[in-house]
């Protein structure tokens, strides 16, 4: 099978990649490279590996059980209190949390369009929201998949080309990956890098999306093989985009150039690209904003529908009501408010703190032999998943202790 054919067959993995490569990722990765150089590249690599591990489990759950993670959670716990608590966590942390992230997604896309047209970002925020609304209202998974494939491809070209133009030091890049280091003052940024890549709501989105891509008529082993390839290729591509942004910002850090936002990175490219720099970079930011503006409401709808036992159908009125609510809240906040870099970093870090809890839920479900049979987690999968939980939980606990003043 040719590489081109494999890329054409990418599916649910693209939803995951498109969801985590948003304006928040662009901003977080820029700040990471600008403030700490290449030192935090290991966190990007860890995040990509962790995402592949957890998303493979999520996809396997969806294909074997034909249930989403929300549905599986409802049937996993027999205790009514625990079950209600799980549903509350899903709706509160995933659905309402996505509304806050949606504002950043829409704002990022609008800023990219403003840079290219000089038309107000607030007006573009409304236009972007309408575009996302129309695509989701059309209710066709294949159309969403195709649009995201184009946008993720555009992002990859823009940011990888930007990295090549910046001429990074290969030895410094390798040193930033191994051994892992935690420079003073970098822990919040590390949590943000993990939180912006290993996105908890993607675990709900992926388990449902694979069922749209591979029907029950497809032999399960064939579907699992295709899904794993899709997951590895798409998420690795998304990770390359994040890596490229950190590396580009790090080259400016090495030259002593202070960059405080993604927009400033575009300005620093002007000596190389001339007046086209802002348009070049804005194109990537626009693609990042659009992909996340589509996937965040979709993920919230899948998570909420699964947790409450509704039909996970793009044309179901209740399903539509959830994603529409996320879109409306996002555009209102984008038009009337602001989302500074510090707020984006905090939101991504909060995502990183939430990750261990959702990942533990996923591991519990994936060990249910009554649900998954021979496809339940083996020792290797549990060790890999456990390692992700321990690292994320350890970093989160360390940060919380630091905030409350327990650490020196």
Image: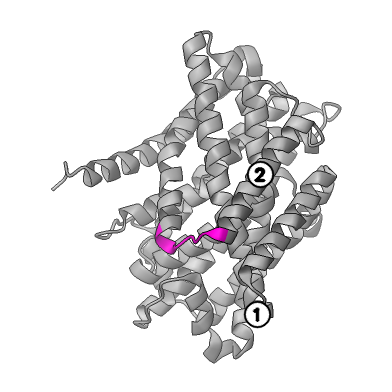
Quadrant position of residue 368: top right
> Where residue 253 sits in the image (x, y, percent)?
37, 76
Taking the spot 69% from the left edge, 29% from the top edge, the residue there is 62
Residue located 64% across and 16% down the image: 371
The part of the chain drawn in magenta is 336-342
| 196 displayed left or right of 291 | left
- Upstream in the sequence, badge 1 or badge 2? 1
Bin the neighbour count of mark 2 within 10 Å (Cα to Cα): few under 14, some 14-19, many 20 and up.
many
Q: Residues within 10 Å of mark 1 (few under 14, many from 20)?
A: few
Could you say which quadrant of the image residue 121 lies in? bottom right
**Picture coordinates of residue 80 (x, y %)?**
51, 9
For label 1, the SS is loop
Q: In the rendering, which numbered label is found on residue 297? A: 2
400 up-or-down from 371: above or below: below
| Res. 387 in view | yes
Q: Which marked residue is nearer to the observer: mark 1 or mark 2?
A: 1
Residue 69: within the magenta?
A: no
Whole-percent x and y of residue 322? Answer: 68, 36
Q: Which mark is residue 118?
A: 1
Q: Is residue 340 magenta?
A: yes
Q: Secondary structure at mark 2?
A: helix
């Amino acid at each position: 099978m040719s590489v081109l054919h494999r890329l054409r067959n990418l599916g649910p993995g693209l939803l995951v990649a498109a969801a985590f490569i948003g304006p928040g990722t662009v901003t977080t990765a820029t700040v990471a490279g600008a403030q700490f150089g290449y030192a935090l590249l290991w966190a990007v690599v860890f995040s990509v590996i962790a995402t592949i591990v957890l998303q493979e489990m999520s996809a396997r759950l969806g294909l074997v059980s034909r249930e989403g993670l929300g549905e599986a959670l409802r049937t996993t716990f027999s205790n009514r209190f625990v079950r209600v608590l799980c549903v509350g966590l899903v709706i509160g942390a995933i659905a309402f949390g996505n509304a806050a992230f949606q504002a950043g997604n829409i704002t990022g896309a609008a800023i990219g369009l403003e840079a290219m047209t000089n038309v107000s970002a607030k007006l573009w925020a409304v236009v972007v929201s309408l575009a996302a609304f129309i695509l989701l209202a059309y209710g066709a998974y294949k159309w969403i998949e195709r649009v995201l494939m184009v946008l993720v491809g555009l992002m990859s070209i823009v940011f990888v080309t930007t990295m090549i133009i910046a001429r990074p030091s290969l030895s410094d890049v390798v040193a930033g990956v191994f051994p892992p280091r935690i420079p003073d003052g970098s822990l919040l940024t590390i949590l943000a890098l993990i939180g912006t890549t290993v996105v908890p709501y993607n675990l709900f989105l992926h388990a449902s999306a694979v069922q749209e891509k591979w029907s029950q008529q497809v032999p399960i082993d064939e579907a699992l093989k295709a899904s794993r390839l899709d997951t590895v290729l798409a998420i690795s591509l998304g990770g390359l985009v994040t890596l490229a942004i950190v590396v580009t910002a790090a080259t400016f850090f090495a030259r002593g150039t202070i960059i405080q936002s993604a927009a400033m990175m575009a300005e620093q490219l002007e000596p190389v690209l001339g007046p086209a720099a802002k348009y070049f970079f804005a194109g990537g930011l626009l693609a990042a904003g659009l992909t996340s503006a589509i996937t965040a409401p979709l993920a919230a709808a899948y998570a909420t529908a699964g947790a409450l036992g509704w039909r996970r159908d793009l044309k179901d009125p209740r399903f539509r009501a959830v994603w529409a609510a996320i879109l409306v809240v996002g555009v209102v906040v984008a038009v009337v408010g602001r989302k500074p870099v510090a707020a984006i970093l905090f939101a991504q870090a909060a995502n990183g703190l939430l990750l261990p809890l959702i990942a533990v839920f996923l591991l519990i479900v994936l060990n249910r032999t009554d649900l998954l049979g021979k496809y339940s987690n083996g020792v290797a999968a549990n060790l890999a998943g456990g390692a992700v939980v321990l690292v994320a939980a350890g970093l989160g606990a360390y940060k919380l202790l630091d905030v409350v003043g327990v650490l020196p």
